[in-house]
Image (tube, rainbow, N blue to C red):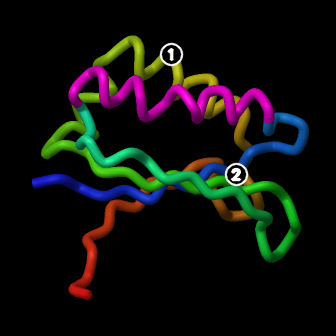
């Protein structure tokens, strides 16, 4: 059963362009490796309410168990590691968060 994730990326000011390049390649790479469903990812950009710093959101559906397997793929890590470096912690908030959620009925 697919598993939806809402990724939160707290991108450091000045790193937006580099981050967006990685973000554009993220889902296509996961999809090519068979780790996500055919439903394309959705991206949002905004500003944190408390400090106005950039925050990005990415929503997509993992294939069952694929979020753990993704850590074993060098191609995925070649995207994730630079993404991590372009993001920053803010107060008690981590640089990136990945809550897995399930959709409620309509």
Gap in angstroms between the C-alphas marked 2 and 1: 19 Å
Left or right of 63 in this view: 82:
right
Quickly name the residue at label 2. 10
Q: Position of residue 28 (x, y in %)?
A: 41, 28
Q: Is residue 86 above or below residue 8?
A: above
Seen as rendered, the residue at the extreme left is 1
Quarter of image, res 75: top left
Please name the residue shown 70% across and 51% down the image. 10
Left or right of 66 in this view: 60:
right
Please give the range of residues in magenta. 17-34
Quarter of image, res 6: bottom left
| Dot 1: element | helix
Please name the residue shown 48% across and 31% down the image. 26
| Dot 2: element | loop
Decide whether residue 57 is among the magenta residues: no
Which is more toward the observer, 77 or 33? 33
Which is more toward the observer, 86 or 17? 17
Q: Position of residue 83 (x, y in %)?
A: 62, 31
- Point out which mark residue 78 bears: 1
Decide whether residue 29 is among the magenta residues: yes
Left or right of 68 in this view: 87:
right
Seen as rendered, the residue at the extreme top is 74
Q: Is residue 29 above or below residue 106?
A: above
Please name the residue shown 35% across and 29% down the image. 30
Q: Is residue 20 above or below residue 91?
A: above
Q: Position of residue 8 (x, y in %)?
A: 57, 55
Secondary structure character of the magenta stretch overall: helix
Left or right of 39 in this view: 58:
right
């Amino acid at each position: 059963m697919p598993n939806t994730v809402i990724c939160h990326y707290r991108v450091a000011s000045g790193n937006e362009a580099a981050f967006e390049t990685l973000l554009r390649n993220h889902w296509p790479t996961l999809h090519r490796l068979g780790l996500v469903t055919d439903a394309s990812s959705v991206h949002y950009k905004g500003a944190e309410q408390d400090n106005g710093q950039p925050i990005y959101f990415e929503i997509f559906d993992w294939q069952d168990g694929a979020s753990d397997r993704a850590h074993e793929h060098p191609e995925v890590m070649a995207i994730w590691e630079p993404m991590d470096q372009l993001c920053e912690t803010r107060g008690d908030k981590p640089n990136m968060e990945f809550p897995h959620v399930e959709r409620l009925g309509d």
